Image (cartoon, grey):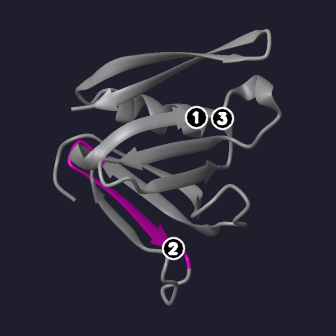
Amino acid sequence: MAGGEQEEKRVKYKSSIKDPGTPGFLRINDVMLLFVPNDPKSDSKLKLQTKNIKIHKNTKESSNKPPWLYLTTYQGRNHIFEFENYPHMHTCRDFVGKLPSTLFFAFILVGRTIYFSCCLIFK
């Protein structure tokens, strides 16, 4: 991987929320995101240029959900990473957040409740 700063964390790579996940390491820098599974025979390897990341979202600590980081590419592919803890997820989320981006807000009306969503769209 090229670039200066780099983050490396233990994660589970998930193809969907219900997927139990493949344990391994997530390495990310300003150019490339790389998932390396613990099992070298696993097919769950991922190599993604960070410029192809369109949107990133994450679970909130107060949601009683695991610390997940969701990445969506311009090609429409979704990648979910489950971290060991929230501080590790926040570190990687902040690293991805340093990339050039545009803030996108959405208001969704369901019945009489308005939900607010915010995400980053990468250029």
Disc 2 residue type (three-letter): Pro
Residue 37 is labelled as 2
Q: Position of residue 92 (x, y in %)?
A: 46, 38
Q: CA distance from mark 1 to mark 2?
A: 21 Å
Taking the spot 29% from the left edge, 48% from the top edge, the residue there is 74
> What main secondary structure does the magenta stretch of the protein show?
strand
Q: Position of residue 98 (x, y in %)?
A: 30, 27
Q: Position of residue 13 (x, y in %)?
A: 56, 62
- Along the line of sight, which residue is nearer the eye, 83 or 77? 77
- Along the line of sight, which residue is nearer the eye, 88 or 79? 79
Residue on which disc 1 sits: 58
Would you place residue 106 above or below residue 77 in this image? Answer: above
Q: Compare marks 1 and 2 and give the one earlier in the sequence.
A: 2
Taking the spot 43% from the left edge, 28% from the top edge, the residue there is 94
Q: Compare marks 3 and 2 and give the one earlier in the sequence.
A: 2
**Residue 15 lies in what quarter of the image?**
bottom right
- Along the line of sight, which residue is nearer the eye, 5 or 22? 22
Q: CA distance from mark 3 to mark 1?
A: 10 Å
| Residues drawn in magenta | 29-38
Give the number of the mark in front: 1 or 2.
1
Mark 3 element type: helix
Farthest bottom residue in view: 41
**Residue 45 lies in what quarter of the image?**
bottom left
Q: Residues within 10 Å of mark 1 (few under 14, many from 20)?
A: some
In the displayed structure image, the side of residue 39 where residue 62 appears, left or right: right
Would you place residue 3 above or below residue 101 in this image? Answer: below
Disc 3 residue type (three-letter): Tyr
Q: How many marks?
A: 3
Farthest front residue in view: 111
Q: Which quadrant of the rendered structure holds the C terminus?
A: top left
**Residue 99 lies in what quarter of the image?**
top left
Taking the spot 39% from the left edge, 26% from the top edge, the residue there is 120
